[in-house]
Amino acid sequence: MRFGLAVTMLLGGCAVEETPSATDSEPLDAAPDAITDVSDTAPPPTKAPTLAALTDRTVAEDELLTVPVVATDATHVVATGLPPGARFDAETRTVVFRPDFIQGGLAPWTVTLRASNPIGSATTSFRITVTDTIHPPVPTITRNEDLGTCRRLTLAVKTDAYTDSPGHAGRTFTAVVVVPKSTLTKPAPVRVYLHGVGGAPNASAGCTSYVTVEPHDPMTSYWWGYSDKLPGGAPTTGTVPPYTARRVLQLVDWAQRSQGGDPLRTFVTGTSMGGAGALTLGLLWARHFAGVDARWGQAIARNHRPARLATLEKLWGTREANLDDGAGLGVWDRLDLTRALRDEPEAAGQFVFVKHGKDDATIHFGAVTIASPLTKRTFYEALRGHPHYAVWDEGGHGPADPVLPDGWWDGGWSRIGDATAFLALDRLAPAFSLASHDGDPGDGTGNGKVKWDANGGFAADVAVAGDTGWKGDLAGAKNRHLRWDASKAVDTEDRVELPLRAFAGTGKAPPRAGYPTIDDQIGAKLPIVVDVMLRRVVRFQPAPGEVLAWSCGAQKGEVTVGADGTFAAPRVELGTDWVTLSFHR
């Protein structure tokens, strides 16, 4: 799919699959299920490795490309320069890539393979070109308003049989895109905002420093899609493709290629249904999004309240039928995002911010504290080992906590625009876990104050402090105050490093006993002790089973690389001064 201006995306296919841990109480001092390096099970090599030459490859959008890599006498093979969403399967030594429909027509990616053993190394390269084969109708501008420092564009987005079910194809949706005039000379970050149930693109959206994209989901499809049998038939057979998500991605592509949006700094946000949609697009299409900001979103489709399940089953088919999503997986399984975090390498590097309220009776707190029927893990548990920042309080579905002000958890930290702790697809991101100052959200059960309700869970009166029926702290966070300096990240073949600290800024003391501090005042005992795994690593690719040295300030030690290629420093101590976490061979 191609629009007007071409933008070259310089991304590495860097996500690695994570093996889920046994429990959330175990520190990450050694990756589980580490496998033995080839050199431990075979005779030591007697000569340097060789790599067979690879020819350039061309693949169409939505088609699968596999490129076998033939390496002789190699104990370790790595790939760099992969297209976004591609991966190198080290076990089978195969490059695997299925480009989506907005990746065609870009400049070719040059992939470099490096084989090594204790005696020497060898490299070879080839190019991957994605042909532009899927062409939904190009959005058209129906209104162009000059707001001074930006332009507000109203778009008509006409569908075809790829972005809509065959019976609906040809209809038109409205979208709003706000573009800073500064993009004429420099790309700007893109913020995709997904509205909640009954919402619509904001026709009054104003100027910001980034490109704002506001799509429309009037079918309440939770930003996924619906049965290919609609509107004429019932969703009892057939597939449930991501028609709505495709229309969002189409707008993202349009904003990046024709309006100066930065493909390395595109973010997806939303509230309620939009929060669920932000998590869905941000994790399932992580190749396109640098970060996710989701408020009051349900991340496990089967755990929706009964009333919402009834409406979604009219679009997706029943949970029991679990119709194919068009890509070989049941739609209800696909939209269980604990499964995505467990199974999909692409999701592993994504940074996720989530906020929920314990007195939210619309999308109750069980959205993050009740386990998935499929994976047996809660969303909070599934986030462990992935970059995330999770916040909860006694607020409701929009209304703030009765004691704490809205946004109490930090002083307005922007992962889009912060000078140091920012997110980009070509920068390292830390995954903090088991921080010593983390709050206790509870285990998804009740404290005896409120009787369970199938729709509201243990939610109580949002205006009354302390009355929630959920166990755990009334308000708290995971990974609050923890920061990194992405501008000083290092990622080479021999070393990876990232400066870290606990950020202590201005703020206020807790308003009452048992409550957290306000804004960026740290109330926890320093240093904060936390496990740290580095994600979005591209060039530093140690072998499973390899032993790495790590250091962070005065701390140092060794860790073993897990079977999935991940590595973490255990119990790192962070104060308010910068210290650099480093891993090397």
Image (cartoon, rainbow, N blue to C red):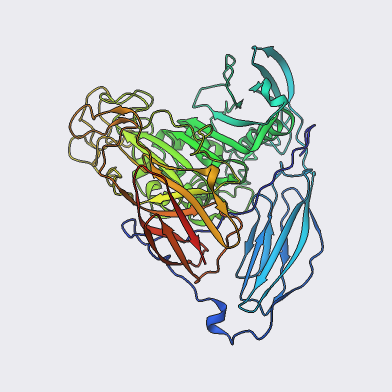
Where is residue 305 shown, x and y percent of the image? 39, 37
Q: Is residue 186 above or below residue 346?
A: above
Q: Is residue 317 visible?
A: no
Residue 503: name its quadrant. Answer: top left
Viewer-closest of 486 and 166: 486
Viewer-closest of 457 and 388: 388
Where is residue 118 shown, x and y percent of the image? 61, 78
Where is residue 469 shown, x and y percent of the image? 23, 36
Q: Residue at position x 58%, y 60% from top?
A: 540
Residue 210: name its quadrant. Answer: top right
Q: Is residue 52 above or below residue 455?
A: below
The quarter of the picture where the N terminus appears is top right
298 sits to left or right of 8: left
Q: How many marks?
A: 0
Where is residue 332 shown, x and y percent of the image? 51, 47
Q: Residue at position x 30%, y 26% from top?
A: 401
Viewer-closest of 510 and 140: 510
Q: Is residue 3 visible?
A: yes
Q: Residue at position x 71%, y 36% from top?
A: 166
